[in-house]
Image (cartoon, rainbow, N blue to C red):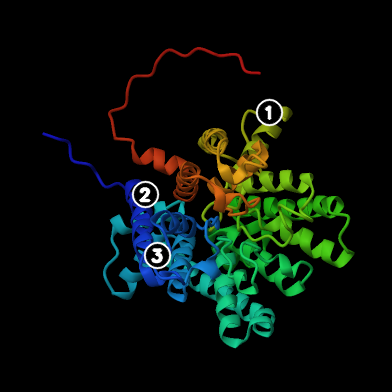
């Protein structure tokens, strides 16, 4: 008799994302979802749905010029669900329906947002939803001051709402094709204070994470009272914004000062992990090679755990950095702010980064193989740097591209879809979903292996 498959929280999380992708694909393949009815192929709809629900931003068709208003609304809904997590939406619907939320539902919600414990799930859901509406609403209101004068009332308001949601959810989808230049992102606004400050601030707030919001809400601005997680996130975020901004300002020295400052700040923030770009990443007038390399590094790091962002996460990097620092100091445990970090956290961080890097290497190799004989790149073959950039952008759910995405072969698109899904659902989460409970085995004899 076949063994019954248990629907664990991890498995439900993976199945939930797959269900969202399936529904989104079916909606986008409807003829009136595209501006030329029926012009969207299954792969176009599938790739766009995966990118939107995984809040990535890589596109094979320009969002404004290809998709109708219905298609754009579907994409926006997928971005919103992917940003706050589908279990948050389910949890909200249960509360609105005044249905009793039991231990099972709370466990699923805990797994969805990576909460440390089951207590306070209702309060956390309220914080997530109210905070999301507040920040997206304020962001859309500010962006209206730029988009309405440029595109008129109706389109301007819609673009402001779409861009604010996309930025806060760290998605990177845009409607700038309305300007007549598809795939240009917000490059026309290089040096514009409203765009270059509002979008990055929405990205930063969305990338801090729901637990950080709740901690700041509870303890206001008393830094000493914050949890260690919040302290590490805030410090790492500040470092990863200020330091890259300075480096990019030095590298992009051919820009006027005002444009250089604003564009450098924008370019330093968006790789973690939004996908908007205010400076061209390819073609004439593109950024310097050091900016491209720094962008890859920032995409790899990403935002913070329990947020709308991807990447290995700032707290993972902080824990690995602290473990190296403890080794140099001769400490037996990893310590920070008068606290000892659990050894399991250090082990999990190392395992996660190893899996993440392995997927990047495999993905880059596959892209290079698939694109070697692609006629679209006959004049200039896809370089390893371009393939690496695309792969890191996909698995870190960023959405930045050097411009090769629309011309990729079917094999490469499938690889990117898999990477986007793994990046949003979580590499370790997907791996654990296949794990079946088993009785603990006896420990084997221990033997040391030389390292370094």
Separation of residues labelled 1 and 2 (CA atoms): 37 Å
Q: Position of residue 120 (x, y in %)?
A: 42, 62
The quarter holding residue 98 reads bottom left
Residue sitting at the far left: 1
Q: Is residue 40 left or right of residue 243?
A: left
Q: Nearer the viewer, residue 204 or 293?
A: 293
Q: Secondary structure at mark 1?
A: helix
Q: Which residue is mark 1?
A: 327
Closer to the N terminus: mark 3 or mark 1?
3
Q: Which residue is mark 2?
A: 14
Closer to the N terminus: mark 3 or mark 2?
2
- Look at the image and tell me whether residue 310 can be seen: no
Instruction: Evaluate if marks 3 and 1 touch, with contact meaning CB atoms under 8 Å apart.
Output: no
Closer to the N terminus: mark 1 or mark 2?
2
Q: Is residue 193 left or right of residue 448?
A: right
Of badges 3 and 2, nearer the viewer stands 3
Q: Quadrant of the N terminus?
A: top left
Of badges 1 and 2, nearer the viewer stands 2
Q: Quadrant of the C terminus?
A: top right
Q: Is residue 128 left or right of residue 213?
A: left
Looking at the rendered structure, which numbered label has been put on residue 28?
3
Q: Position of residue 50 (x, y in %)?
A: 45, 55
Q: Nearer the viewer, residue 419 or 72?
A: 72
Up/down of 404 relative to 91, above or below: above
């Amino acid at each position: 008799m076949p063994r019954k498959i248990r629907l664990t929280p991890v498995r439900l999380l993976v199945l939930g994302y797959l269900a969202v992708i399936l529904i989104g694909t079916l909606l986008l393949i409807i003829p009136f979802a595209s501006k030329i009815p029926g012009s969207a192929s299954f792969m176009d709809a599938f790739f766009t749905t995966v990118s939107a629900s995984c809040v990535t931003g890589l596109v094979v068709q320009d969002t404004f010029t290809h998709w109708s208003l219905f298609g754009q609304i579907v994409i926006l809904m997928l971005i919103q669900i992917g940003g706050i997590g589908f279990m948050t939406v389910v949890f909200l619907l249960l509360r609105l329906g005044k249905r009793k939320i039991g231990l099972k539902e709370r466990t699923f919600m805990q797994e969805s947002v990576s909460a440390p414990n089951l207590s306070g799930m209702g309060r956390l859901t309220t914080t997530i939803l109210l905070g999301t509406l507040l920040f997206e609403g304020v962001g859309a209101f500010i962006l209206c001051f730029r988009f309405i004068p440029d595109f008129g009332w109706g389109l301007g308001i819609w673009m402001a709402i779409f861009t604010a949601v996309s930025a806060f959810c760290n998605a990177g989808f845009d409607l700038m094709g309305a300007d007549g230049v598809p795939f240009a992102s917000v490059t026309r606004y290089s040096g514009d204070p409203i765009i270059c400050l509002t979008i990055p601030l929405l990205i930063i707030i969305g990338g801090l994470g729901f637990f950080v919001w709740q901690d700041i809400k509870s303890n206001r601005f008393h830094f000493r009272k914050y949890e260690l997680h919040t302290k590490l996130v805030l410090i790492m975020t500040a470092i990863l914004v200020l330091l890259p901004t300075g480096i990019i300002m030095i590298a992009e020295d051919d820009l006027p000062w005002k444009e250089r400052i604003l564009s450098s700040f924008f370019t330093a923030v968006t790789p973690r992990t939004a996908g908007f770009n205010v400076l061209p990443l390819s073609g004439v007038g593109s950024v310097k090679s050091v900016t491209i390399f720094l962008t890859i590094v920032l995409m790899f790091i990403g935002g913070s755990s329990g947020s709308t962002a991807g990447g290995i996460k700032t707290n993972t990097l902080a824990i690995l950095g602290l473990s190296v620092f403890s080794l140099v100091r001769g400490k037996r445990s990893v310590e920070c702010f008068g606290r000892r970090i659990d050894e399991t956290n250090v082990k999990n961080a190392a395992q996660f980064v190893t899996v993440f890097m392995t997927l990047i290497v495999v993905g880059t190799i596959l892209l290079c193989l698939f694109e070697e004989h692609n006629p679209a790149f006959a004049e200039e073959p896809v370089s390893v740097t371009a393939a690496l950039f695309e792969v890191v952008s996909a698995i870190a759910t960023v959405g930045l591209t050097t411009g090769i995405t629309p011309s990729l072969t079917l094999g490469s698109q499938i690889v990117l879809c898999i990477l986007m899904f793994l990046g949003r659902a979580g590499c370790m989460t997907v791996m654990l979903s296949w794990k079946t409970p088993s009785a603990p085995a006896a420990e084997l004899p221990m033997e040391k292996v030389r390292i370094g």
